[in-house]
Amino acid sequence: GKSTFSALLAHGLAADETKQVALLDIDICGPSIPKMMGLEGEQYVEENLGVMSVGFLLSSPDDAVIWRGPKKNGLIKQFLRDVDWGEVDYLIVDTPPGTSDEHLSIVQYLSATHIDGAVIVTTPQEVSLQDVRKEINFCRKVKLPIIGVVENMSGFVCPKCKNESQIFPPTTGGAEKMCQNMNVSLLGKVPLDPEIGKRCDRGQSFLAEAPESPATLSYRNIIQRIQEYCEQHHLQEEKIM
Amino acid sequence: MSGKGGVGKSTLSTELALALRNAGKRVGILDVDLCGPSIPRMLRVQDSSVHQCDRGWVPVFVGHDTAIALMSIGFLLERPDDAVVWRGPKKNALIKQFVSDVAWGDLDFLIVDTPPGTSDEHISTVEALRPHQLLGAILVTTPQAVSVGDVRRELTFCRKAGLQILGIVENMSGFVCPHCSVINCGSVFFILGPTGSELSLSPPCPTGCVPLDPQLSQSLEEGRDFIQEFPKSSAFPALTHIAQQILDTSQKSS
Ligand SMILES: Nc1ncnc2c1ncn2[C@@H]1O[C@H](COP(=O)(O)OP(=O)(O)OP(=O)(O)O)[C@@H](O)[C@H]1O
Ligand SMILES: Nc1ncnc2c1ncn2[C@@H]1O[C@H](COP(=O)(O)OP(=O)(O)OP(=O)(O)O)[C@@H](O)[C@H]1O
Ligand SMILES: [Mg+2]
Ligand SMILES: [Mg+2]
Ligand SMILES: [Zn+2]
């Protein structure tokens, strides 16, 4: 749920009209942001929300970007240097999974800007958590602060009988236990909700379409914690300078 | 292969290997997901390690019949949580080594589990395996449009790489609520329609639809043999059907 979360975080932060938000998709081989933001076919910039993705540069939905690392790194550099982002309060970066070229490059290219930190998204089962531990160790290795972890798809509430099922069972204690062990914060848990997938596919903001749902409340809570973290971080930076 | 993460590539690789072994075949699994290897845990051999012999690395053999041989970067890490922070060239070199310097022995099938995308790992694997007559690629997707979009790009990759498409698996399609037995509107995720028709493949070749099955995820967490132990489970028929189609295709091509 990385891209879904990035898209909703962008919507959430841009709800404050005094803030300029930028959303950069560096998943070069599998960009999802144009579809999730409802921007297919055209690069469209809302008043205070700018979006950039390789998806805007492809001529057809069947175009594959069959590139090795160096070419991907080149494009990421261009996205940062040659896109007229304007004055930006928040830059959200959606990454592919892994700890490789895209991740190293973005951290390297943005190092002078003092990145606030990384939000790590996982699902509750161990097969996913074992990747997340690697991701956390990656952040530590490249000295990228970790804002916290979001546990996505934790529990599914049947729309018919309202009972909950664990489709992705937290066999080793889920993100909660992992966060304790690795000493990082758990920002929150988001349940599996078919409506999220549906809104994503239609390029709509789930937060706006289902304002009362438990998943929206959870997302809002997480977004608020991220805002608070960033404000704190900026205050500290100002003190240092 | 898939364009998206977490759609079930490693799951399918694992279950396919188990099903082929069940059919009496010798199977190798080459895990080229260097930043996020999952197969060792899914087969409960995460604590094993590989050693050297004069013909190269000896892969890890799974089960008492040792009919599954597995090579993964997971076996080379000092600590299981170590991040592999490598750029492309280093990844490419290791993949070449995995193909040429592993004493795979006599195999009927070699299954390659890839990370998502169409980049270094994929190009290097196809290049390294080209002399060995690749049977083809199985694409995995989930029912959502964002995932189906990625399959289209993956199809283009296969076409350019000269890889035959063995089939498309729509995974996580549908979920039967264990409490009320209601099939959740076809899906827990949002369904657009049968993937095959959405992609208008010619000839239409969806290999199968695998439902969301909590018993499958539980079994993978514990590294159990789902094919042997859960024949009544909802994902079982689809998984074994996929394996059967692979067996048929390989028979035809040999
Ligand atoms: N809580 C949720 N409930 C239901 N569906 C969800 C939820 N979170 C994400 N999804 C759906 O799951 C799919 C995968 O999510 P997403 O594309 O955000 O993952 P990702 O981590 O970005 O994947 P990738 O590794 O391919 O970049 C999407 O179709 C999305 O709509
Ligand atoms: N049909 C299914 N029913 C229930 N759980 C499933 C199903 N398919 C996969 N899963 C679970 O979903 C998770 C993701 O699957 P898997 O790791 O196989 O995906 P992947 O495509 O290999 O991911 P990655 O892109 O990270 O390599 C796993 O925990 C797996 O157990
Ligand atoms: Mg994504
Ligand atoms: Mg995998
Ligand atoms: Zn129910």
Image (cartoon, coloured by chain):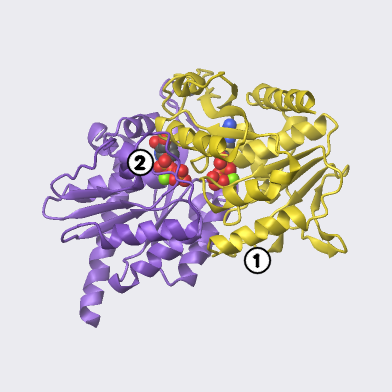
Q: Residue B20 location, x and y as percent?
A: 78, 32
Crowd band around label 1 with a 10 angstrom C-alpha radius: few (<14), some (14–19), many (20+) = few
Q: Colour of chain B?
A: yellow
Point out the image quarter for the N terminus of chain A.
top left
Q: Residue A71 location, x and y as percent?
A: 44, 57
Q: Seen in the image, is B171 located left or right of residue A28?
A: right
Crowd band around label 2 with a 10 angstrom C-alpha radius: few (<14), some (14–19), many (20+) = few
In terms of depth relative to the viewer, which is nearer, B89 or A133? Answer: B89
In terms of depth relative to the viewer, which is nearer, A228 or B149? Answer: B149
Above or below for A57 versus A20: above
Q: Colour of chain A?
A: purple
Residue B77: name its quadrant.
bottom right
Q: Residue at x 25, y 75 (%)?
A: A236
Q: Is residue A170 visible?
A: no
**Which secondary structure, mark 2?**
loop
Mark 1: amino acid: Arg
Which mark, residue B184? none
In terms of depth relative to the viewer, which is nearer, A37 or A164? Answer: A37
Q: Residue at x 21, y 50 (%)?
A: A50
Q: Residue at x 33, y 48 (%)?
A: A6
Above or below for B247 versus B223: above
Point out the image quarter for the C terminus of chain A.
bottom left
Q: Name the residue carrying label 2.
A: A58
Which mark, residue B79? 1
Mark 2: amino acid: Leu
